[in-house]
Amino acid sequence: MCYAIPGNVKSIAGNLITVDYFGEKRKARNDFYDLRVGDYVYAQGGFVVQKIDETDAVEILDTWKELFFELKKTDAKLSKLYNDKPNLDKGFLKIIDRATYGKSIAHEEALRLLLSEDPDEIEVLHKTANFIRQKFLDNSCCVHGIIEFSNMCVCQCTYCGINSENHTLKRFSLNTGEILEVVEDAVKRFGFKGIVLQSGEDPSYRSEELLDLIKKIRENYPVFIFLSVGEREEEFYRKAFDAGAKAVLFRFETSDSNLYSKLHPHSSLKERIRYLELFKDIGYIIAGGSLIGLPGQKAESVIDDFMFAKELGCDMYSFGPFIPHPDTPLYSHNRPDAEYVLKAISVLRLIDPYGKILVTTALESINPQARRQALMGGANSIMLNLTPKDYVGLYDIYPDRATVDVSVENQIADALQLLKNIGRAPTDLGI
Ligand code: 5AD
């Protein structure tokens, strides 16, 4: 099974095209190909990533057709909303009611939901979030692959196991050839249409090398590229966009500037935000977010982070739990409960009915059931780990990461089985 459905180009207006998928129309931006009405394309993240042969497209569409509608039916059934708990608190139900119509909810309302300890309310919250996801975004679920290509890092983030002060960690860095081999497998063998290139902040990896890597990937593989390489010079990000990377995964970690400074002795929140604004200005698709359950972080601050991410115009959200690492200054703190993070994910869905919400590996790491639960509570995106097995254990940002010991084949099989069970199509139809 592949991770995208071919779309048929219906109209073209400059570099914006309209694509049809079994009668559903979506928009996509075309920066790479000479297209005509009637052509078939794959789009990811709202960008055309490949033009495909009509015969191939028709064949692939034929294998998808039945499944496409069958998955939608399953999803519609599982995301129905009926209130079998009419006696819940009136204030709570009022917030839920408004949210089901896609109306934005206020800070104090979001906080009221996140702080709820009532199991009936929490159940209704998750169901409402799933209903909203289905109503506004339908059943597609992005399945991207992440390649962690270097754990060298100059930053001193006090929560992160690969921070520069952790001298016990063995460091690694894959060269361009090694990364291209992983991409080759990801795209040609496994059918990925979107990949994330992630590393610590590693200045020894020169910007020219990264630009060359992006160009080589775009020249040889029809894949949507997310960069997740931290704070680099403005010039690099401008050139990387032109070279073919169209998205960045870049968390602001917390929107509380005091907490930010405590956790990041080397940097400031102001600088972090400057980057996000730069990315927006360049035209990148942005996946942003923060850590949930940081020491000293209140529930109010989590809601601040959600509101802040929405205001920034994030296209995708990446919010995951803080997990204490034994070789960092924060080793003795507690991690949050998975239930709290799941609640937060559902609240985020009520805050933004339209953004993509990622189920983070960190959440999957603290509870193996969490991927399913998060997808049934508002999330609609997952990431599989493609880092070669000799290195994946060394990308030790937090302990006991889920899937480090699971082969790519098995990660794919598990993901597809789960998505099928809950009626989600492993594809990104775009905007
Ligand atoms: N727990 C959870 N997430 C972490 N990250 C770094 N350290 C930890 C930790 N201890 C996350 C950061 C970073 C991403 C690559 O990994 O949020 O943005």
Image (tube, rainbow, N blue to C red):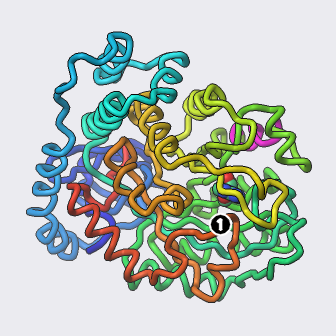
**Badge 1 amino acid:** Gln
Seen at 44% across and 81% down, the residue is 408
- Is residue 285 among the parts visible in the rendering? no
Q: Which quadrant contains ligand 1?
A: bottom right
State whether residue 60 is above or below residue 129: below
Identify the image quadrant of the N terminus: bottom left
Label 1: which residue? 198
- Residue 176 shown left or right of residue 411 in the figure: right
- Check disc 1: other Cα within 10 Å, few if <14, some if 14-19, many if 20+: many
Seen at 54% across and 83% down, the residue is 182
In the image, residue 1 lies in the stretch drawn in magenta: no
Q: Position of residue 252 (x, y in %)?
A: 70, 43
Q: Position of residue 186 (x, y in %)?
A: 46, 79
- Residue 136 shown left or right of residue 401 in the figure: left
| Residue extent of the magenta highlight | 270-277
Q: Quadrant of residue 53?
A: bottom left
Q: Position of residue 160 (x, y in %)?
A: 75, 60
- Residue 319 shown left or right of residue 259 in the figure: left
State whether residue 357 is above or below residue 257: below
Q: Quadrant of residue 134?
A: top left
Identify the image quadrant of the C terminus: top left
Q: Is mark 1 within 8 Å of ligand 1?
A: yes
Q: Quadrant of residue 409?
A: bottom left
Seen at 47% across and 34% down, the residue is 348
- Is residue 22 among the parts visible in the rendering? yes
- Element carrying mark 1: strand
